[in-house]
Amino acid sequence: MRLLIVGDINSEIKKAIDLAQARKVQVMMVGNVEEALDFVREGKGADLVLIDCKYDLGLLIKSMHQEHISTPVIAYGVDCSPAVAVAAIKAGAKEFLPLPPDEKLIAAIFTAISDNTRPLIGTSAAIQEVIAIADKIAPTDANILITGKSGTGKEVFAHYIHEHSTRAQKPFIRVNCAAIPENLLESELFGHEKGAFTGAVARRIGKFEESSGGTLLLDEISEMDIKLQAKLLRAIQEQEIDRVGGTGPIKVDLRIIATSNRNLLEEIANGTFREDLYFRLNIINIELPKLSERKEDIVVLSNNFINKYATNNKLAVKPLSKSAIDKMINYSWPGNVRELENVIHRAVLLSNGEKIQAEDIYLKSESFVGKKIVDVEKELIVNTVGYCLGDLTNAANILGISISTLKEKLELYTNANAINK
């Protein structure tokens, strides 16, 4: 993960930087809003912008929006009042980070934004089979399509393949096709020239150019509008792109890894996905197994997550009790490995005994008995968004729905609450 900080060095932000670097976050720093805009325009690479609230946060976010730059922004401040935090969120920040930083909060923020460096864990035949395929194809330059249900670890596998490729020392760039609005995605991928549209006050380098030499991950590619798919196909075939408003093609050298939680053959039949793009991407297909198909890995995965979150939160590492293991083995895990990680994270934080017991393992199905489906859905969505600190991208991935569907649901709940008041 690459973090761009807009601010001045002081002891409080230095501590935040130390915490970030301890989590293997690459930290860069600029001194003002204009320098930050130049940085992201030039394709130097930032997955998250952290800006001191004393700067013009509204100008930064407005300028990024006008220039079709979708990098998330988080505000921070030292000993700020709640009113400052509220103002930052209203201005468009995804979160407010008070300084000195709370280790649990900063860890949760970085995890919500990007957490693709997890190791591949499991001894089951199902997972070992796909790891063997990944090991075999990683050194090649073949495009790869990774499919599987939400939460099975598609992004983790993509990062693993990059790390074991000949491009490992070059950029690994991720674009979440589900999270970026249709009118912004073309510029995000291909960049734009100054004056290409209203608000394009400078040239902007897109993700294709930014990842040249390395790997570009097109996450949830089935969410991409079919009109843009045609331009993507040409870029992949010709290894060249056209910036929006550009006058000529630009050569790029990159490997494409695409992921989808949908059946793309069904999408092709429905007319929402191009068949020629499918075959261009699907040189090698890796289908990730559901957690219910690799239940022998539940304990080893759980122990890894226990160590991770106990260490992050400076808590004792507790073993799983037999009752807890039995409860997890007998559960269907519709959210797959991501759901397991969330369950263990919660158990680590809330467990009071010397071991993690069955009652510490909170499963979705336990809270749904006797409720209407519409209320269950609302509770699940609202709780998931809260768990993800308002990060709709991460929440949509956990829920297995598109970002647009999630936004529609939240708007529906907001309107219903307004009517009931």
Image: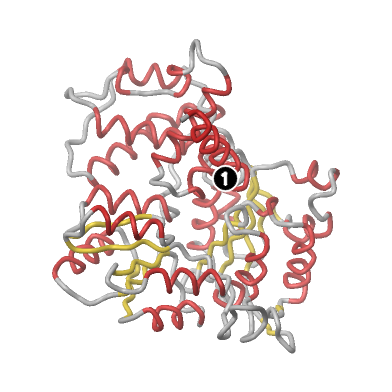
Circle 1 sits on which residue? Answer: 407
Q: Characterize the local packing of mark 1: few (<14), some (14-19) or many (20 or more) Cα atoms within 10 angstroms.
A: few
Residue at x 58%, y 20% (from the top left corner)? 373
Q: In this view, does 218 lie to the left or right of 54?
A: right
Amino acid type of the residue tagged 1 in the rendering:
Lys
Question: Is residue 283 placed above or below 413 in the rendered structure?
Answer: below
Give how far across and how far down residue 192 sits, in percent.
Answer: 63, 80
Give how far across and how far down residue 183 sits, in percent.
Answer: 67, 64
Give how far across and how far down residue 121 sits, in percent.
Answer: 43, 42
Residue at x 62%, y 57% (from the top left corner)? 177
Give how far across and how far down residue 229 sits, in percent.
Answer: 76, 62
| Colour pattern | secondary structure
Q: Element at badge 1? A: helix
Toward which corner of the image does residue 56 lie, by quadrant? bottom left
User: Farthest residue toward the left?
Assistant: 11
On the question of residue 166 being in view, the answer is: no
